[in-house]
C-alpha cells in the first residue's frame, strides 16, 4: 500500500516538473516570452525571403506574425510595409503597406537608418494609390483635371504592375516569365511512351511547329487581378494559385487587355504548341507526363492535391523549365475541338480553328484527375462558355521579327 502511494507521488512530482519546465509556473515568464520569440523567428524568415526575392514566402511568414497575440515590432512594421508597397499588385495591399510604414515612422526618430527609406516608400505608395496625384480624397467635387490625373496615375500604376509581374525572374509563382521555345517537328498523339490512350489521340502524325514563347507558369490569380481588377475564382485564398473558373470567352478579353496594356501580343497556345512544349520540345526525353514518368514529381493530381489548387511552380519543371504542364489545372488552348487527328494540318503554326468552335480543347489534367489524364498526349474538350474550378490557362506569344 505504501509502495503504491510512493509511486503515485513520484508520478505527480514528475508531472509538476514537466509543467514547470513548459512555463506553467506562477511567474508565467516562458509564456510571456514565447510570442516575442516566435515573432523574431518569423520576422527573420520573412526578411530572408524578401532578400531572395521570394515575396510569396515572405507573405506567409508575415501573416503568421499578424496572427500572434502581441503588438508588432518596428522592424516588422517596416519590413512588411516595404513588402506590400514594393510587391503588392492590388491597391488595397499598397494602402495597407503605407499604413504599416506610417505606424513605423511614428515610433522611429529621424536618425533611424530606415527613416529616409520609409519616406521614399510612402511617397511611392501615394503615387501607386493614386490619391495624392489629384489632391482629392474622393471623386466627389474633384475638377475634371484632377480626375484625369487620377485616371492617368491608375493607368501608369497598372502598367508598372504588369511590367513587374511579367519580368523574367526565377521566383516561382511571383512572376510570369515567357520561355522561348525553338521551332521543330515532333510526333503528335499517342506515341509509344503514352499509355491508356483514347481514340481522339490518333492517328499519330508529324507536326511542324514554329518558334514561339510560352508562360513558365500557369496564369495566377495575382496576374488576373492586376489586369481585370477582380478574381471570380472558386478557390479564393491563394494569389499564387492558378486562375480558374474563367471561360474561354473571358480569357480572350483578358488577353486583349493584357496585350493593350503591355504592348505585347499575348494569346493562348495552340494545341500543337502546348503538346510540343509539354513533351520538352527538341530536348524531349520521351516522358509520359510533362517532365517525368512519375506523376508525383511534376504534378498535383487526385493522389496528392488535397482536392484543391496549389501555388504554381512547386513541383519539378519539365525539360524546358515549364511548371505544372501536367496537373494543378487543365489549360485552355486556342484550337476548336476535333475528335481525332484524321484531317489535322501538319503545319500547326496557327490554331486549328475549323470545325465545332462551340467547344475548345483543354490539356494537361488537373488536381481532381487521375494520372491517366496528366499524360502529355491526353486531350479533351470544354464548351467555350463554361467556368469550372479545375480549368485555367497559360500565356503564349509569337516572337516579334
Image (cartoon, rainbow, N blue to C red):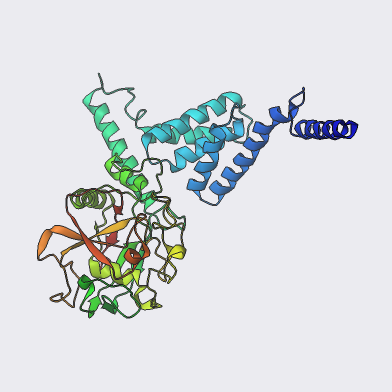
Quadrant in which residue 127 is drawn: top left
Q: State the image quarter where residue 8 is shown.
A: top right
What residue occupies the far top of the structure in this picture?
Answer: 141
Identify whether 157 is placed above or below 309: above
Q: Can residue 116 be seen by looking at this rendering?
A: no
Q: Residue at x 90, y 31 (%)?
A: 2
Residue 164 vs residue 40, the one in the foreground: 40
Residue extending furthest toward the left? 355
Q: Judge from the rendering whether residue 292 lies leftward or rightward of residue 58; answer left or right.
A: left
Work out which residue is located at the far front of the displayed protein and give it.
Answer: 1
Residue 70 placed where, x, y %? Answer: 61, 27
Front-most of residues 344 and 107: 344
Q: Position of residue 392 (x, y in %)?
A: 29, 53
Q: For the point 32% across and 60% down, which residue is it?
A: 365
The quarter of the picture where the N terminus appears is top right
Q: Nearer the viewer, residue 121 or 308?
A: 308
Residue 324 place in picture, x, y as percent? 39, 60
| Count of numbered circles on the image | 0
Q: Position of residue 131 (x, y in %)?
A: 35, 28
The image shows residue 187, relative to residue 105, as above or below, that is below
Residue at 37% x, 35% y is 91
Q: Is residue 60 left or right of residue 376?
A: right
Quadrant including the C terminus:
bottom left
Residue 57 appears in the picture as rendered: yes
| In front of the other: 366 or 325 | 366
Amino acid at each position: 500500500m505504501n509502495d503504491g502511494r510512493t509511486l503515485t507521488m513520484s508520478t505527480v512530482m514528475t508531472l509538476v516538473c514537466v509543467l514547470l519546465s513548459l512555463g506553467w509556473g506562477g511567474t508565467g515568464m516562458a509564456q510571456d516570452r514565447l510570442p516575442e520569440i516566435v515573432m523574431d523567428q518569423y520576422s527573420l524568415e520573412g526578411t530572408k525571403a524578401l532578400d531572395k526575392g521570394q515575396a510569396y514566402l515572405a507573405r506567409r511568414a508575415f501573416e503568421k506574425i499578424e496572427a500572434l497575440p502581441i503588438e508588432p515590432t518596428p522592424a516588422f512594421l517596416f519590413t512588411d510595409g516595404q513588402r506590400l508597397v514594393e510587391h503588392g499588385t492590388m491597391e488595397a495591399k499598397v494602402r495597407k503597406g503605407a499604413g504599416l510604414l506610417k505606424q513605423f515612422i511614428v515610433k522611429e526618430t529621424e536618425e533611424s537608418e530606415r527613416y529616409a527609406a520609409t519616406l521614399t516608400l510612402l511617397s511611392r505608395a501615394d503615387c501607386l494609390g493614386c490619391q495624392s496625384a489629384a489632391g482629392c480624397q474622393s471623386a466627389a467635387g474633384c475638377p475634371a483635371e484632377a480626375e484625369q490625373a487620377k485616371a492617368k496615375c491608375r493607368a501608369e500604376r497598372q502598367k508598372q504592375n504588369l511590367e513587374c509581374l511579367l519580368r523574367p525572374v526565377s521566383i516561382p509563382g511571383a512572376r510570369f516569365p515567357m520561355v522561348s521555345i525553338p521551332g521543330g517537328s515532333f510526333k503528335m498523339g499517342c506515341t509509344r511512351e503514352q499509355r491508356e490512350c483514347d481514340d481522339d489521340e490518333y492517328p499519330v502524325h508529324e507536326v511542324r511547329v514554329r518558334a514561339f514563347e510560352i508562360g513558365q507558369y500557369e496564369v495566377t490569380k495575382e496576374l488576373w487581378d492586376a489586369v481585370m481588377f477582380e478574381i471570380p475564382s472558386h478557390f479564393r485564398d491563394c494569389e499564387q494559385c492558378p486562375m480558374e473558373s474563367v471561360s474561354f470567352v473571358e480569357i480572350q478579353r483578358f488577353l486583349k487587355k493584357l496585350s493593350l496594356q503591355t504592348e505585347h501580343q499575348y494569346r493562348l497556345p495552340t494545341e500543337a504548341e502546348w503538346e510540343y512544349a509539354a513533351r520538352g520540345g527538341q530536348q524531349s526525353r520521351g516522358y509520359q507526363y510533362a517532365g517525368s514518368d512519375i506523376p508525383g514529381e511534376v504534378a498535383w493530381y487526385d493522389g496528392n492535391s488535397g482536392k484543391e489548387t496549389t501555388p504554381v511552380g512547386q513541383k519539378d519543371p519539365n525539360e524546358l523549365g515549364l511548371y505544372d504542364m501536367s496537373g494543378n489545372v487543365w489549360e485552355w488552348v486556342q484550337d476548336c475541338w476535333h475528335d481525332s487527328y484524321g484531317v489535322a494540318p501538319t503545319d500547326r503554326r496557327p490554331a486549328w480553328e475549323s470545325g465545332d468552335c462551340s467547344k475548345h480543347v483543354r490539356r494537361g489534367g488537373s488536381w481532381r484527375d487521375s494520372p491517366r489524364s496528366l499524360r502529355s498526349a491526353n486531350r479533351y474538350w470544354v464548351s467555350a462558355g463554361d467556368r469550372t474550378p479545375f480549368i485555367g490557362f497559360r500565356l503564349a506569344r509569337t516572337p516579334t521579327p
